[in-house]
Amino acid sequence: MVRLGEYDVTTDKDCDELKTICAEPVLDVGIDKTIIHPKYNPSAINRAYDIALLRLNQTITYTG
């Protein structure tokens, strides 16, 4: 599962310093497929190629 829209995990809602503008609620979404870079080596000291693609199990609308 991934969480979309989270900025500050120490608060329930993500708001500006004055608490006047708050972000949309977070969205927890399941992962359908994980594609790890073929050259990724978890033992490598420099962590080269430490990237992956996640296919989510639902369509997401970007809310900016």
Image (tube, rainbow, N blue to C red):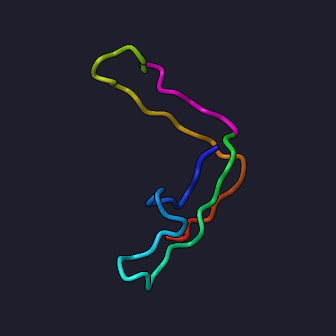
Magenta residue check for 35: yes
Residue at the spot x=65%, y=46% of the render?
A: 56
For residue 55, which quarter of the picture? top right
Question: Which residue is outermost to the bottom?
Answer: 20
- Asked if residue 26 is positioned above or below residue 56 in the image, the reply reads below
Q: Position of residue 18 (x, y in %)?
A: 37, 83
Residue at 40% x, 29% y: name it: 50
Magenta residues, start to end = 32-39
Tell me where residue 34 appears, x and y as whole percent. Answer: 60, 33
What residue is drawn where x is 49% and y is 64%? 11
Seen from the viewer's position, the closer of residues 40 and 17 is: 17
Q: Give the residue at the far top of this rendering.
A: 43
Coordinates of residue 47 in the picture (x, y in percent): 33, 24
Magenta part, dominant SS: strand
Position in image of residue 59 (x %, y %): 69, 56
Residue depicted at 58% across the width and 52% down the height: 3
Q: Quadrant of residue 33?
A: top right
In the picture, residue 30 is in which quadrant?
top right
30 or 60: nearer the eye? 30
